[in-house]
Amino acid sequence: MIRLDRVTKRFKFKGEMRYIAKDVSFTVPRGNSIGLLGRNGAGKSTLLRLIAGTIKPTSGRIIRLSNVSFPLGFQGSFNGTLTGEQNVRFVARIYGHDTEELIDYVQDFAELGKSYYMPVKSYSSGMKARLAFGVSMGIDFDYYLVDEITAVGDSNFKRKCKRVFEEKLQSSDIIMVSHSNGSLKEYCTTGIVLEDGSLTYFNDIDDAIRMHNDNMARR
């Protein structure tokens, strides 16, 4: 279970106070994969990072009684001065995973070759995404947080990512941000629409997509 308890996240932009979440209380249900929708700048990626615990709310608290991944598409999770292998070692220790097992898994999965032992700041965005995806697939999470990217690289690598990801979803849920309605419908059964700091939950992803489209049409 993930519980948002009166969570507010705000920041100043060009002298104006903007809200990602405004006094939000919500329990993320277990057993349903959720699509997160909202206009550009609504704060979808920031909300994922709040849920992951990589940033803190302005007020309120987020209670995690489940094992939650960091956002798969968020490359800022890594220390750029450390090598890929060192970053994986660090993540393994944080999540209490067998260090050498995870290092070996990611080395094989990400297919980075010698770059695995080079600083992450030298990586392309695609290489960082491969590393992040490999780390996430190497650890069993109750919730996988997905920010746009579910597979990167050539067609063979994409097929491998899709196969492993779908295997994980047999026993795990996802919270996914995507601008592709097709991806949302493929992976998600329910939806949340983020608009002006408020969250609206729908039991059917199609209803969430309709509300999001209506919001977009009004502005």
Image (spheres, helix red, strand yellow):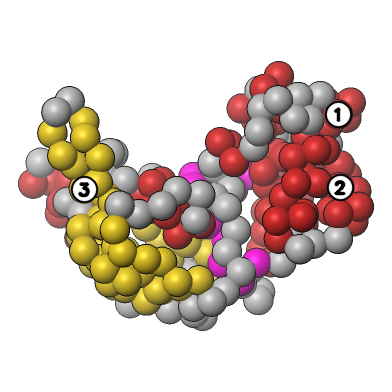
Q: Is residue 122 visible?
A: yes
Asked whether the residues under the numbered discs 3 and 2 touch, taking CB atoms below 8 Å apart as contact, a structural biologist would say no
Tag 2: amino acid: Ile
Residue in view at x 19 percent, y 42 percent: 18
Quarter where residue 67 is shown: bottom right
Q: Is residue 146 magenta?
A: yes
Q: Badge 3 is on which residue? A: 19
> Which mark is drawn over residue 185?
none
What secondary structure is found at the residue carrying circle 1?
helix
Q: Which span is picked out in magenta?
A: 141-151
Q: Badge 1 is on which residue? A: 117
Q: Is residue 212 visible?
A: no
Position of 4 relative to 198 (above/below): below
Q: Horizontal and vertical percent for residue 171? A: 65, 76
Quarter where residue 23 is shown: bottom left
Please tell me how crowded label 2 is: few (under 14), some (14-19), or many (20+) other residues with Cα within 10 Å.
Answer: many
- Mark pair 3, 2: CA separation: 39 Å
Position of 23 relative to 197 (above/below): below
Residue in view at x 60 percent, y 58 percent: 69
Please tell me how crowded label 1 is: few (under 14), some (14-19), or many (20+) other residues with Cα within 10 Å.
Answer: some
What secondary structure is found at the residue carrying circle 2?
helix
Q: Nearer the viewer, residue 72 or 49?
A: 49
- Mark pair 2, 1: CA separation: 11 Å
Tag 1: amino acid: Tyr
- Mark pair 3, 1: CA separation: 40 Å
**Mark 2 or mark 1: whose residue is earlier in sequence:** 2
Residue lying at the far front in this picture: please name it. Answer: 59
**Mark 3 or mark 1: whose residue is earlier in sequence:** 3
